[in-house]
């Protein structure tokens, strides 16, 4: 895990999600259940709910889980202090743990934290690291904008490149060429920023999916949609299964750097259709 990135995160859940995604990237068979078992959690759904923001991480569990995170000693202390801050009930406690975080965070990171803004500005920001795998990738915002389509400006691409480089999503190798790092996704300073930007990303993705559905030849696409009646307790299992499918597809079919010819969007969506109140 990128230890420098950790000190820019202000939500312990974000650190856990980054760690989980990286563990799955290394081992597609890795699951929340397996992680919970390794940590001796009696209830695997607890960790799942923490990752989804449904429950808070308890301080005693944070001390147990921090040892399983691929972090430096300061990184683990930072994560633990975040959890204690999030569980603080008095102003004195909050001030104490806020002060502790500032002491742990490297000065350079502390300065950058105040200057940083949400990195999820446009859907292009989510894509720019994958573009470095294209065989025709160039450090040229004008060319890359044309590659993405007429609705993308060179300015947006330039911003995406700078932000991705700044936060470590991409880097320049010893030949001066951009390449993707192993960071799972971009983290932002605030959960609210990320949620707001994620909503913008979803809208942009749906817009492009609609355009593809209407304009791209049917033999060049694959749209699969069906309705699935389920029991409520199956939802989380299906979610985890879709994550495993996504990881497996990436592992089996993602081109090696410099060999990709195109980038496709693969969307696995799961959402409720029966929105009415079932009560009489």
Image (cartoon, rainbow, N blue to C red):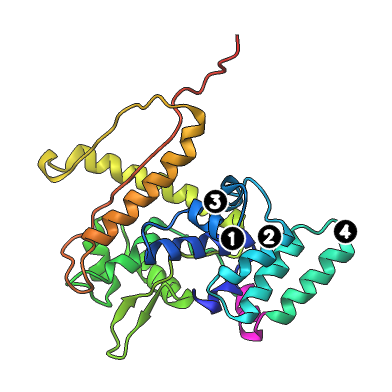
Residue 196 — which label? 3
Q: Residue 163 lies in magenta, yes or no? A: no
Q: Is residue 15 left or right of residue 134?
A: right
Between discs 2 and 4, the one toward the N terminus: 2
Q: Look at the numbered discs 2 and 1 and tell me whether their residues touch, using CB distance below 8 Å.
A: yes
**What is the total number of numbered labels drawn onto the structure image?**
4
Magenta-colored span: 105-114
Vertical side of 195 occupied by 257: above or below:
below
Query: What secondary structure is marked by label 3?
Result: helix
Vertical side of 265 occupied by 251: above or below:
below
Query: What secondary structure is marked by label 4?
Result: loop
In the picture of the structure, the residue carrying the numbered disc 2 is 61
For residue 268, what is the image quadrant? top left
Q: CA distance from mark 4 to mark 1?
A: 30 Å
For the residues carrying marks 2 and 1, which lies nearer the camera in this image? 1
Query: What secondary structure is marked by label 2?
Result: helix
For residue 194, what is the image quadrant? bottom right
Q: CA distance from mark 3 to mark 4?
A: 29 Å
Q: Residue 208 versus residue 45: which sits nearer the camera?
A: 45
Q: CA distance from mark 2 to mark 1?
A: 9 Å
Q: CA distance from mark 1 to mark 3?
A: 32 Å
In the picture of the structure, the residue carrying the numbered disc 1 is 39
**Residue appearing at x 10%, y 41% in the figure:** 219
Between discs 2 and 1, the one toward the N terminus: 1
For the residues carrying marks 3 and 4, which lies nearer the camera in this image? 4
In the picture of the structure, the residue carrying the numbered disc 4 is 90
**Residue appearing at x 24%, y 56% in the figure:** 149
């Amino acid at each position: 895990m990128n230890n420098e990135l950790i000190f820019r995160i202000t939500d312990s859940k974000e650190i856990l999600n980054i760690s989980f995604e990286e563990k799955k990237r290394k081992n597609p068979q890795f699951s929340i259940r397996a992680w919970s078992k390794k940590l001796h959690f009696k209830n695997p759904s607890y960790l799942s709910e923490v990752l989804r923001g449904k429950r808070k991480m308890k301080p005693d569990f944070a001390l147990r889980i921090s040892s399983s995170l691929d972090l430096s000693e300061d990184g683990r202390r930072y994560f633990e202090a975040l959890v204690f801050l999030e569980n603080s009930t008095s102003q004195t406690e909050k001030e104490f743990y806020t002060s502790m975080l500032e002491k742990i965070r490297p000065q350079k990171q502390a300065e950058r934290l105040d200057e940083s803004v949400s990195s999820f500005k446009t859907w292009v920001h989510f894509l720019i690291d994958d573009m470095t795998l294209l065989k025709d990738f160039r450090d040229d915002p004008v060319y890359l904008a044309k590659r993405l389509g007429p609705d993308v400006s060179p300015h947006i691409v330039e911003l995406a490149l700078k932000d991705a480089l700044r936060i470590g999503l991409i880097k320049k190798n010893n030949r001066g060429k951009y390449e993707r790092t192993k960071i799972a996704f971009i983290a932002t300073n605030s959960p609210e920023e990320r949620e707001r930007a994620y909503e913008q990303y979803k809208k942009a993705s749906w817009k492009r999916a609609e355009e593809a559905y209407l304009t791209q030849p049917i033999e060049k696409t694959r749209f699969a949609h069906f309705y699935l009646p389920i029991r409520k307790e199956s939802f989380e299992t299906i979610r985890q299964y879709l994550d495993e499918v996504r990881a497996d597809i990436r592992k089996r079919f993602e081109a090696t750097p410099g060999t990709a010819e195109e980038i496709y969007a693969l969307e696995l969506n799961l959402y409720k259709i029966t929105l009415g109140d079932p009560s009489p």
